[in-house]
Image: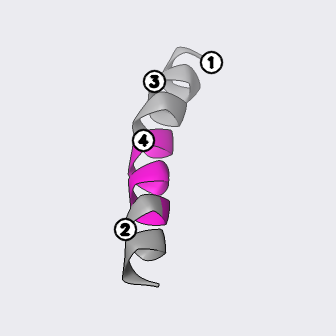
Amino acid sequence: FGSLVKLLPMRIPPKRKQNNEQKKSQ
């Protein structure tokens, strides 16, 4: 469970950053 909690926070920020970049591109 500990590793899952660590992986989730690390995986969420990059996804949000990609969305912001995609919005700027459009």
Whichever of labels 3 and 2 marks the residue nearer the N terminus, that label is: 3
Instruction: Provide residue 23's location: percent of width, then percent of height.
Output: 48, 71
Viewer-nearest of labels 1 and 3? Answer: 3
Residue, x 57% and y 28% (percent of image)?
4
Viewer-nearest of labels 2 and 1? Answer: 2
Whichever of labels 2 and 1 marks the residue nearer the N terminus, that label is: 1
The dot on residue 21 is 2
Residue underneath mark 1: 1
- Helix, strand or loop at mark 2: helix
How packed mark 4 is, by other alpha carbons closer than 10 Å (few <14, some 14-19, many 20 or more), is few
Residue underneath mark 4: 13
Which three-letter amino acid code belongs to the residue tagged 4?
Pro
Residue underneath mark 3: 6
Instruction: Provide residue 25's location: percent of width, then percent of height.
Output: 38, 82
Whichever of labels 1 and 3 marks the residue nearer the N terminus, that label is: 1
Taking the view exactly as shown, the residue that stands out farthest to the bottom is 26
Asked if the residue under mark 3 is in contact with the one under mark 1, i.e. CB atoms within 8 Å, the reply is no
Whichever of labels 4 and 3 marks the residue nearer the N terminus, that label is: 3
Magenta highlight on residue 15: yes
Q: CA distance from mark 1 to mark 3?
A: 9 Å
Above or below 18: residue 24: below
Instruction: Provide residue 19's location: percent of width, then percent of height.
Output: 49, 63
From the viewer's perspective, tell me whether residue 16 is left or right of residue 21: right
Magenta highlight on residue 9: no
Asked if the residue under mark 3 is in contact with the one under mark 4, i.e. CB atoms within 8 Å, the reply is no
